[in-house]
Image (spheres, rainbow, N blue to C red):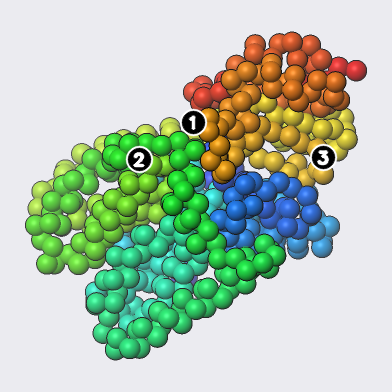
C-alpha cells in the first residue's frame, strides 16, 4: 500500500509538470535557448550559434552535453524533427521538476507547503524551461530532502553533496547558497571529522574530474569554467552590461515577484524563528541561508528574478512550518478565502505569462519553420532587426540556413564609448542598414517589431508584410506589441 501511494503521488507531480509544458508557451529569457538548446544543437548537428560566453569559456558544457545525448539519439533514429528537439528536453525537465516537487513534499510533509509550491506562479512558469536556474532549483529541492537535518534519517549521510557538486558545475553561483548549509553539516555531523573531510575531498575531486574533462574536451584545451566565470563576471563586471539594479532590488522587487503573496507572512515567521531559535534548527539554518544568499547576491549589480528561484523552497518551508506552530489560528472560512485568493491570483498570472506575454517570439519561429512565411524555409535567409537573442534560433528551426541578428557583446576589450551592434542600430537604424546592406544582397526574410517599422521605412520598400503576430501588451525596451515578418519583393 505504501509503495502504491508513493508511486501515485510521484506520478501526480510529474503529470502536473508535463501538463504545464502545454500551458507555458511563451518566451522568458535568452538563456533558456542560447545557453542550452542552441549549444546542444551545434554539438550534434554541426551548425548553430555560440555566444561570446562560450568564446571566453565561462559556460560549462555539462548541461548542453546532457541535452545533446537526447539529440544524438534522435539523429541516429532519424527522428530529429524540430518539434521533438524542442519538447523532449522540456519533458525531461518536467520529469526532474516533478520528482523534485515530490521530494520537497516528502521533506516538508506539509500539504500547505506543497500547495504553495505547486501554485506558485513563478515556479510553474519556469519549472519546464531549459534554464540552468530551473535545474538548479529542482536539484536544490532534491538535495534539501536528503540533507542531514537534525533528527533526520539522513543524519549520517553525505549523499546530498553529489547533487551540490553537480549544481556548482552547471551554475557556479550555487556554491553561495550551500556554504552555510555545508558549514552546518560539518559542525552537526556525528561522523569523525577526518572521515568527513575525506568525503568532501573525494566529492570535490570527482566533480572536478568529470567537469574539467567534459569542458576541456569540447573547448579543445584544458578549461576550468568556474574560474573563467569568476574572472569575467565578478572581477571584470562584464555582467553589468546587461543591466544593473540597486542593492535592495531583491527585497523590493525580486522576492515579492518570485515568492508571491506568502511573502506577506514571512516577517511574522522570521520573528517567531528568532524568538524560538533553540527549537527550530532547520528553520534557523534555512533563514541564515536565505539572508546570506540575498546579501551576497545584492552586492552583485546585475540581478534577475530567476537567480533567487532556488531560495523558493526554503521560503516556503520556513513560512509553512512556522505557521503551524503559531498560537493564533485563522477560522476555516478565512483559511479558505486566503487559499482561494492565492490560487486565483497565481492562476491568472500564469495564464498571462504562460499563454500571452511574449508569445510572438516563439510563434514567429514556429510559423516560419512550418512554411507559413515562405514555401521552402530551408532556402531562405533571415535578418532579425530587434534586440539581441529575442527569439530561439537554430534549435527551433533545425534548418541550416543563414541567419543574422543584432549582437550585444559586452565591452570585452575596454574600448572607450563602446556601443554593441544592437545599440548602434537603435541609435541610428538607417546608418546601420546603409553600412551593412548598401549594394549587398538583401535577406529574403526580415523579422522585427511593429515599433521598429517606422524607423526603417525606406529599407522596408524592398519588402512586403508576410505575417503579423501578437507579442505582448507590455513591450520591453526596443520591442513592440506585435512581431512582424516581412518577405523580400522579387
Nearer to me, 101 or 420 = 420
Please state if 335 lies on the left or on the right of 169 as rendered: left
Label annotation for residue 340: none
- Answer with mark 2 or mark 1, whichever residue precedes in sequence: 2
Estimate how packed mark 2 is, as few (under 14), some (14 to 19) or many (20 or more) residues with alpha carbons within 10 Å: some
Indicate whether 31 appears above or below 427: below
Secondary structure beneath label 1: helix
The image quarter containing residue 161 is bottom left
The residue depicted at 31 percent of the width and 62 percent of the height is 108
Determine which residue is flagged by label 3.
401
Estimate how packed mark 3 is, as few (under 14), some (14 to 19) or many (20 or more) residues with alpha carbons within 10 Å: some
Secondary structure beneath label 3: loop
Determine which residue is flagged by label 2.
254
Looking at the image, how many numbered discs can be counted on the residues? 3
Estimate how packed mark 1 is, as few (under 14), some (14 to 19) or many (20 or more) residues with alpha carbons within 10 Å: some
Please state if 313 lies on the left or on the right of 414 as rendered: left
Determine which residue is flagged by label 1.
352
The residue depicted at 56 percent of the width and 44 percent of the height is 412
The residue depicted at 35 percent of the width and 84 percent of the height is 196
Q: Is label 1 or label 3 in front?
A: 3
The image quarter containing residue 150 is bottom left
Amino acid at each position: 500500500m505504501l509503495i502504491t501511494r508513493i508511486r501515485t503521488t510521484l506520478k501526480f507531480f510529474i503529470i502536473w509538470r508535463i501538463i504545464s509544458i502545454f500551458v507555458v508557451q511563451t518566451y522568458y529569457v535568452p538563456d533558456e535557448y542560447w545557453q542550452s538548446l542552441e549549444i546542444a544543437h551545434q554539438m550534434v548537428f554541426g551548425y548553430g550559434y555560440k555566444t561570446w560566453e562560450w568564446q571566453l569559456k565561462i559556460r560549462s558544457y555539462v548541461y548542453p552535453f546532457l541535452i545533446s545525448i537526447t539529440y544524438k539519439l534522435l539523429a541516429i533514429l532519424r527522428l530529429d524533427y524540430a518539434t521533438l528537439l524542442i519538447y523532449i528536453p522540456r519533458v525531461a525537465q518536467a520529469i526532474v521538476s516533478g520528482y523534485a516537487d515530490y521530494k520537497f513534499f516528502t521533506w516538508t510533509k506539509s500539504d500547505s507547503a506543497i500547495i504553495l509550491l505547486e501554485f506558485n506562479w513563478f515556479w510553474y512558469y519556469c519549472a519546464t524551461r531549459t534554464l540552468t536556474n530551473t535545474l538548479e532549483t529542482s536539484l536544490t529541492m532534491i538535495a534539501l530532502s536528503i540533507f542531514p537535518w537534525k533528527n533526520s534519517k539522513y543524519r549520517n549521510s553525505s549523499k546530498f553533496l553529489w547533487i551540490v557538486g553537480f549544481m556548482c558545475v552547471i551554475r557556479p553561483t550555487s556554491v553561495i547558497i550551500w556554504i552555510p548549509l555545508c558549514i552546518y553539516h560539518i559542525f552537526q555531523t556525528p561522523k569523525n571529522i577526518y572521515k568527513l573531510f575525506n568525503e568532501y575531498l573525494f566529492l570535490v575531486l570527482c566533480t572536478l574530474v568529470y567537469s574539467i574533462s567534459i569542458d576541456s574536451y569540447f573547448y579543445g584545451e584544458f578549461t576550468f569554467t568556474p574560474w573563467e566565470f569568476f574572472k569575467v563576471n565578478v572581477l571584470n563586471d562584464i555582467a553589468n552590461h546587461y543591466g544593473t539594479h540597486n542593492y535592495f532590488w531583491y527585497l523590493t522587487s525580486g522576492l515579492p515577484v518570485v515568492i508571491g503573496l506568502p511573502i506577506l507572512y514571512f516577517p511574522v515567521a522570521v520573528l517567531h524563528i528568532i524568538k524560538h531559535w533553540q527549537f527550530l534548527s532547520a528553520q534557523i539554518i534555512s533563514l541564515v541561508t536565505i539572508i546570506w544568499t540575498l546579501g551576497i547576491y545584492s552586492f552583485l549589480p546585475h540581478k534577475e528574478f530567476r537567480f533567487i528561484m532556488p531560495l523558493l523552497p526554503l521560503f516556503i518551508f520556513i513560512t509553512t512550518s512556522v505557521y503551524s506552530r503559531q498560537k493564533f489560528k485563522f477560522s476555516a472560512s478565512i483559511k479558505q478565502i486566503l487559499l482561494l485568493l492565492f490560487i486565483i491570483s497565481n492562476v491568472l498570472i500564469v495564464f498571462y505569462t504562460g499563454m500571452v506575454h511574449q508569445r510572438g517570439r516563439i510563434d514567429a519561429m514556429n510559423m516560419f519553420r512550418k512554411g507559413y512565411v515562405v514555401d521552402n524555409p530551408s532556402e531562405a535567409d533571415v535578418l532579425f532587426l530587434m534586440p539581441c537573442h529575442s527569439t530561439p534560433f537554430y534549435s527551433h528551426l533545425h534548418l541550416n540556413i543563414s541567419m543574422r541578428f543584432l549582437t550585444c557583446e559586452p565591452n570585452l576589450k575596454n574600448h572607450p564609448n563602446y556601443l554593441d551592434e544592437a545599440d548602434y542600430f537603435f541609435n541610428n537604424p538607417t546608418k546601420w542598414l546603409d553600412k551593412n546592406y548598401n549594394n549587398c544582397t538583401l535577406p529574403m526574410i526580415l523579422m522585427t517589431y511593429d515599433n521598429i517599422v517606422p524607423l526603417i521605412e525606406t529599407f522596408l520598400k524592398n519588402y512586403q508584410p508576410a505575417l503579423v503576430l501578437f507579442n505582448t501588451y507590455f513591450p520591453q525596451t526596443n520591442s513592440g506589441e506585435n512581431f512582424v515578418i516581412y518577405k523580400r519583393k522579387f
